[in-house]
Amino acid sequence: GMAISIPNSTMFHHKIYALRKVNEIQDQQHIAQMIYQLNHHNFYNSTLKIRLQQIQNAAATNTSILTNHSYTLSQEEHFSTTAKMLQSLHQAKVSIKHADIWPKPLTFQGTTINYILQQLKSAYKIKTKLNKLEIYAIEQCTNYTHSQTLIWTHIAQTIPKIQRGRKPKWFEQITQQTNKIIGDENYKLLTPNPYTLKAKQINKKDWVYNTKTK
């Protein structure tokens, strides 16, 4: 038997294999390794520092992947080992705030579109498309007052690239999910929408014609 005075940190240490399930042992290994490397004195010269920024860029969000767990990665990073290690942190509800604000998130206005992607199948594939178009916020898919979503031919006004051709199938999925959250108090979209211009009313004036006859 074991003494009652044994601390929990010993009971659930990731190297005591007989006390945990295999998947739980792996998760604890990931968590322990990640925390150790983040606090290592040589962190700034490590590959982990680079990998975290690469994953942060793939998440394309305005919050840190170490503190906010509601993100979706693009296809090239979705199945990576570092991404799996971060997933273990998220499942254990562990948040880490780095003193030097690393990795550095994107600086854009609005509500991250990752909230929508979490409801979709194969979200990482859609995320890859969105990153290429630089669609990072839900507000980029709505009109000035968030009363309705933009159609595909109008999405060009909220992104730096003009799109040609037919509307892709994944955009219809984004539109459907956006329509569900419009007006939802749980999603406070940025108002007025910074990605669209306010419609201006042009006052029409009567033209006056002066004719001169000789």
Image (cartoon, rainbow, N blue to C red):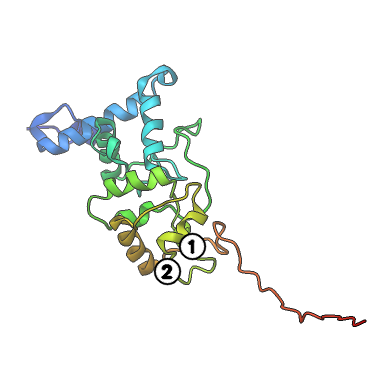
Category of crowding for the residue at label 1, using alpha-carbon neighbours closer than 10 angstroms: few (below 14), some (14–19), many (at least 20): many
User: Which amino acid does the dot numbered 2 rest on?
Assistant: Ile
Report the front residue among 185 and 4.
185
- Residue under label 2, please give it: 182
Q: Residue at x 11, y 32 (%)?
A: 2
In which quadrant will I find the C terminus? bottom right
| C-alpha span from label 2 to label 1 | 8 Å
Q: Residue at x 19, y 30 (%)?
A: 14
Q: x%, y% of residue 71?
A: 35, 47
Judged from the image, the secondary structure of the residue bearing numbered disc 1 is: loop
Q: Is residue 180 above or below residue 90?
A: below
Q: x%, y% of residue 93?
A: 31, 45
**The quadrant where residue 23 appears:** top left
Report the front residue among 18 and 158.
158
Q: Is residue 38 above or below residue 133?
A: above
Q: x%, y% of residue 187?
A: 43, 63
Q: Is residue 38 visible?
A: no
Cβ atoms at labels 2 and 1 below 8 Å apart:
yes
Q: Is residue 158 above or below residue 211?
A: above
Category of crowding for the residue at label 2, using alpha-carbon neighbours closer than 10 angstroms: few (below 14), some (14–19), many (at least 20): some
Residue 111 numbered tag: none
- Residue under label 1, please give it: 189
User: Which amino acid does the dot numbered 1 rest on?
Assistant: Leu
